[in-house]
Image (cartoon, rainbow, N blue to C red):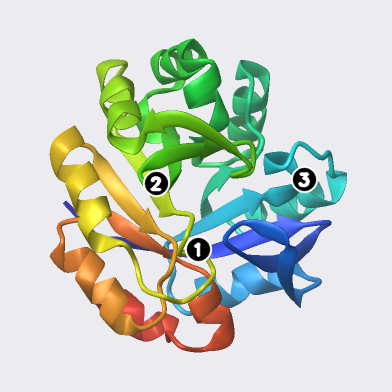
Amino acid sequence: MSFTIYPAIDLRGGKVVRLKEGDPARMTSYSDDPAETARKWLGMGAQWLHVVNLDGAFGEGDNANRAALESILKLGARVQFGGGIRSMESIADVLKLGVSRAILGTIAIEQPAIVADALTRFGAEQIAVGIDARDGLVRTRGWKDNSGVSAIDLALQMRTVGLGTVIFTDVSRDGLGSGLNIPSTRELAERSGLDVIASGGVHTIDDVIAAKDAGLAGCIIGRALYDGTVDLKEALQV
Protein backbone atom coordinates (compact mmCIF):
# COMPACT_ATOMS: atom_id res chain seq x y z
CA MET A 1 0.00 0.00 0.00
CA SER A 2 1.37 3.39 -0.98
CA PHE A 3 1.53 6.26 1.50
CA THR A 4 0.10 9.58 0.29
CA ILE A 5 0.57 13.11 1.63
CA TYR A 6 -2.48 15.36 1.33
CA PRO A 7 -1.89 19.10 1.79
CA ALA A 8 -5.09 20.56 3.25
CA ILE A 9 -6.94 23.56 1.88
CA ASP A 10 -9.82 24.49 4.18
CA LEU A 11 -12.24 27.00 2.68
CA ARG A 12 -14.42 29.52 4.47
CA GLY A 13 -15.99 32.40 2.61
CA GLY A 14 -13.74 31.64 -0.34
CA LYS A 15 -10.57 32.03 1.72
CA VAL A 16 -7.97 29.51 2.89
CA VAL A 17 -8.24 29.18 6.67
CA ARG A 18 -7.45 26.83 9.53
CA LEU A 19 -9.53 26.21 12.63
CA LYS A 20 -8.48 24.93 16.03
CA GLU A 21 -10.50 21.86 17.09
CA GLY A 22 -13.02 22.74 14.37
CA ASP A 23 -14.09 25.90 16.22
CA PRO A 24 -15.03 28.73 13.81
CA ALA A 25 -14.32 31.24 16.56
CA ARG A 26 -10.66 30.08 16.56
CA MET A 27 -9.90 30.67 12.91
CA THR A 28 -6.71 31.82 11.21
CA SER A 29 -6.93 33.10 7.64
CA TYR A 30 -3.95 32.29 5.41
CA SER A 31 -4.87 33.35 1.89
CA ASP A 32 -7.54 35.03 -0.21
CA ASP A 33 -6.47 32.97 -3.24
CA PRO A 34 -7.14 29.23 -2.87
CA ALA A 35 -5.94 28.47 -6.41
CA GLU A 36 -2.58 30.10 -5.70
CA THR A 37 -2.29 28.02 -2.51
CA ALA A 38 -3.09 24.87 -4.48
CA ARG A 39 -0.56 25.84 -7.15
CA LYS A 40 2.10 26.20 -4.43
CA TRP A 41 1.54 22.70 -3.02
CA LEU A 42 1.32 21.11 -6.46
CA GLY A 43 4.50 22.90 -7.48
CA MET A 44 6.27 21.25 -4.56
CA GLY A 45 5.25 17.84 -5.84
CA ALA A 46 1.91 17.04 -4.16
CA GLN A 47 -0.13 14.47 -6.10
CA TRP A 48 -3.34 15.03 -4.16
CA LEU A 49 -5.04 17.90 -2.31
CA HIS A 50 -7.49 17.64 0.58
CA VAL A 51 -10.09 20.42 0.19
CA VAL A 52 -12.83 21.10 2.73
CA ASN A 53 -15.87 23.37 2.45
CA LEU A 54 -16.14 24.50 6.07
CA ASP A 55 -19.25 26.57 5.41
CA GLY A 56 -20.93 23.46 4.04
CA ALA A 57 -19.82 21.42 7.05
CA PHE A 58 -21.42 23.99 9.35
CA GLY A 59 -24.63 23.95 7.31
CA GLU A 60 -24.05 27.41 5.84
CA GLY A 61 -24.23 27.93 2.09
CA ASP A 62 -21.38 29.76 0.41
CA ASN A 63 -20.95 29.94 -3.35
CA ALA A 64 -17.50 31.47 -2.85
CA ASN A 65 -16.24 28.05 -1.79
CA ARG A 66 -17.65 26.41 -4.91
CA ALA A 67 -15.88 28.98 -7.05
CA ALA A 68 -12.68 28.33 -5.09
CA LEU A 69 -13.03 24.57 -5.62
CA GLU A 70 -13.55 25.07 -9.34
CA SER A 71 -10.45 27.26 -9.54
CA ILE A 72 -8.41 24.52 -7.84
CA LEU A 73 -9.77 21.78 -10.10
CA LYS A 74 -8.78 23.81 -13.18
CA LEU A 75 -5.16 23.22 -12.17
CA GLY A 76 -5.61 19.51 -12.91
CA ALA A 77 -5.10 18.43 -9.31
CA ARG A 78 -6.42 15.20 -7.87
CA VAL A 79 -8.72 16.43 -5.12
CA GLN A 80 -10.52 14.72 -2.30
CA PHE A 81 -13.29 17.06 -1.21
CA GLY A 82 -15.69 17.15 1.70
CA GLY A 83 -17.83 19.40 3.85
CA GLY A 84 -21.62 19.44 3.72
CA ILE A 85 -22.03 16.67 1.12
CA ARG A 86 -25.28 15.22 2.44
CA SER A 87 -27.28 13.96 -0.54
CA MET A 88 -26.79 11.80 -3.61
CA GLU A 89 -27.29 14.90 -5.73
CA SER A 90 -24.43 16.74 -4.05
CA ILE A 91 -22.16 13.68 -4.33
CA ALA A 92 -22.87 13.44 -8.06
CA ASP A 93 -22.41 17.19 -8.42
CA VAL A 94 -18.90 17.37 -6.95
CA LEU A 95 -17.74 14.28 -8.84
CA LYS A 96 -19.07 15.78 -12.07
CA LEU A 97 -17.08 18.94 -11.32
CA GLY A 98 -13.92 16.85 -11.40
CA VAL A 99 -13.36 15.92 -7.77
CA SER A 100 -11.52 12.59 -7.62
CA ARG A 101 -12.91 11.47 -4.25
CA ALA A 102 -15.95 12.75 -2.36
CA ILE A 103 -15.67 12.65 1.44
CA LEU A 104 -18.90 11.81 3.24
CA GLY A 105 -19.21 12.55 6.93
CA THR A 106 -22.51 13.31 8.61
CA ILE A 107 -24.61 11.22 6.20
CA ALA A 108 -22.59 8.13 7.10
CA ILE A 109 -24.24 8.40 10.51
CA GLU A 110 -27.61 9.90 9.59
CA GLN A 111 -28.27 8.27 6.20
CA PRO A 112 -25.91 5.33 5.71
CA ALA A 113 -28.04 3.99 2.86
CA ILE A 114 -26.93 6.96 0.76
CA VAL A 115 -23.29 6.02 1.33
CA ALA A 116 -24.05 2.45 0.28
CA ASP A 117 -25.84 3.67 -2.85
CA ALA A 118 -22.97 6.05 -3.69
CA LEU A 119 -20.43 3.23 -3.38
CA THR A 120 -22.51 1.10 -5.73
CA ARG A 121 -22.99 3.93 -8.21
CA PHE A 122 -19.53 5.52 -8.23
CA GLY A 123 -17.22 2.87 -6.79
CA ALA A 124 -14.96 2.74 -3.76
CA GLU A 125 -12.21 4.76 -5.48
CA GLN A 126 -14.42 7.84 -5.63
CA ILE A 127 -16.01 7.68 -2.17
CA ALA A 128 -14.41 8.05 1.26
CA VAL A 129 -15.97 8.45 4.68
CA GLY A 130 -14.60 11.05 7.05
CA ILE A 131 -14.74 9.78 10.62
CA ASP A 132 -14.19 12.71 12.96
CA ALA A 133 -14.08 11.65 16.60
CA ARG A 134 -13.57 13.01 20.07
CA ASP A 135 -12.90 10.50 22.85
CA GLY A 136 -13.60 7.71 20.38
CA LEU A 137 -17.12 8.89 19.47
CA VAL A 138 -18.04 10.25 16.05
CA ARG A 139 -18.90 13.95 15.77
CA THR A 140 -21.25 15.24 13.05
CA ARG A 141 -22.44 18.51 11.51
CA GLY A 142 -19.15 20.33 11.58
CA TRP A 143 -18.11 18.46 14.74
CA LYS A 144 -20.85 20.18 16.74
CA ASP A 145 -22.95 17.07 17.52
CA ASN A 146 -21.98 13.88 19.32
CA SER A 147 -23.45 10.88 17.48
CA GLY A 148 -22.83 8.47 20.33
CA VAL A 149 -21.44 5.99 17.77
CA SER A 150 -17.87 4.76 18.14
CA ALA A 151 -15.43 5.39 15.32
CA ILE A 152 -14.63 1.69 15.03
CA ASP A 153 -18.30 0.66 14.88
CA LEU A 154 -18.94 3.16 12.08
CA ALA A 155 -15.89 1.97 10.12
CA LEU A 156 -16.99 -1.67 10.43
CA GLN A 157 -20.51 -0.76 9.31
CA MET A 158 -19.18 1.12 6.29
CA ARG A 159 -16.90 -1.76 5.33
CA THR A 160 -19.95 -4.01 4.98
CA VAL A 161 -21.32 -1.75 2.22
CA GLY A 162 -18.07 -1.68 0.25
CA LEU A 163 -16.14 1.28 1.64
CA GLY A 164 -12.38 1.19 1.11
CA THR A 165 -11.06 4.48 2.50
CA VAL A 166 -11.54 6.33 5.78
CA ILE A 167 -10.16 9.71 6.79
CA PHE A 168 -9.82 9.68 10.56
CA THR A 169 -9.55 12.93 12.49
CA ASP A 170 -9.05 13.25 16.22
CA VAL A 171 -11.01 16.48 16.73
CA SER A 172 -9.25 17.23 20.01
CA ARG A 173 -5.94 17.53 18.16
CA ASP A 174 -6.97 19.20 14.92
CA GLY A 175 -5.20 22.48 14.23
CA LEU A 176 -3.27 22.38 17.51
CA GLY A 177 -0.01 20.87 16.32
CA SER A 178 -0.01 18.39 19.16
CA GLY A 179 0.80 15.37 16.99
CA LEU A 180 -1.38 12.72 15.38
CA ASN A 181 -3.28 10.27 17.55
CA ILE A 182 -1.35 7.32 16.13
CA PRO A 183 -2.59 4.63 18.57
CA SER A 184 -6.29 5.32 17.84
CA THR A 185 -5.70 5.70 14.11
CA ARG A 186 -3.69 2.48 13.89
CA GLU A 187 -6.32 0.61 15.91
CA LEU A 188 -9.04 1.83 13.54
CA ALA A 189 -7.04 0.64 10.53
CA GLU A 190 -6.21 -2.73 12.04
CA ARG A 191 -9.71 -3.51 13.30
CA SER A 192 -11.57 -2.28 10.22
CA GLY A 193 -9.16 -3.52 7.56
CA LEU A 194 -9.74 -0.26 5.65
CA ASP A 195 -7.23 2.17 4.18
CA VAL A 196 -7.05 4.89 6.83
CA ILE A 197 -5.72 8.39 6.19
CA ALA A 198 -4.62 10.16 9.38
CA SER A 199 -5.68 13.74 10.05
CA GLY A 200 -5.52 16.20 12.89
CA GLY A 201 -2.41 17.35 14.69
CA VAL A 202 0.56 16.94 12.32
CA HIS A 203 3.26 19.30 13.59
CA THR A 204 6.66 17.96 12.49
CA ILE A 205 8.11 15.53 9.98
CA ASP A 206 8.22 12.97 12.81
CA ASP A 207 4.41 12.86 12.76
CA VAL A 208 4.46 12.04 9.06
CA ILE A 209 7.06 9.30 9.59
CA ALA A 210 5.00 7.86 12.48
CA ALA A 211 1.91 7.68 10.26
CA LYS A 212 3.81 5.85 7.55
CA ASP A 213 5.45 3.49 10.04
CA ALA A 214 2.00 2.68 11.47
CA GLY A 215 0.97 1.24 8.12
CA LEU A 216 -1.54 3.97 7.35
CA ALA A 217 -2.61 4.92 3.82
CA GLY A 218 -1.53 8.53 4.19
CA CYS A 219 -1.82 11.68 6.22
CA ILE A 220 -3.30 15.14 5.81
CA ILE A 221 -1.14 18.12 6.66
CA GLY A 222 -2.72 21.50 7.30
CA ARG A 223 -1.52 24.10 9.77
CA ALA A 224 2.00 22.65 9.88
CA LEU A 225 2.48 23.54 6.20
CA TYR A 226 1.08 27.04 6.60
CA ASP A 227 3.09 27.76 9.73
CA GLY A 228 6.22 26.20 8.28
CA THR A 229 6.83 23.48 10.87
CA VAL A 230 6.71 20.86 8.08
CA ASP A 231 8.40 21.29 4.71
CA LEU A 232 6.19 19.67 2.08
CA LYS A 233 9.10 18.58 -0.13
CA GLU A 234 10.67 16.81 2.84
CA ALA A 235 7.37 15.19 3.78
CA LEU A 236 6.86 13.91 0.24
CA GLN A 237 10.24 12.19 0.40
CA VAL A 238 8.99 10.11 3.34
Residue at image position (25%, 26%) is: 156
Q: 130 and 147: which one is in front? A: 147
Name the secondary structure under disc 3: helix
Q: 227 and 41: which one is in front? A: 227
Residue at image position (48%, 55%) is: 171
Amino acid, disc 1: Asp
Separation of disc 1 and disc 3 at Cα? 24 Å
Amino acid, disc 3: Arg
Separation of disc 1 and disc 2 at Cα? 13 Å
Residue that label 1 marks: 174
Residue that label 3 marks: 66
Residue 191 horizontal/vertical position (percent): 15, 37
Residue that label 2 marks: 167
Q: 231 and 12: which one is in front? A: 12
Residue at image position (35%, 61%) is: 219
Amino acid, disc 2: Ile
Residue 152 horizontal/vertical position (percent): 28, 34
**Measured along the vertical axis of the image, is residue 148 above or below residue 157?**
below
Separation of disc 3 and disc 2 at Cα? 22 Å
Name the secondary structure under disc 1: loop
Residue 170 appears in which quarter of the rendering? Answer: bottom left
Q: Which tag, 1 or 2, sits closer to the chain's start? A: 2
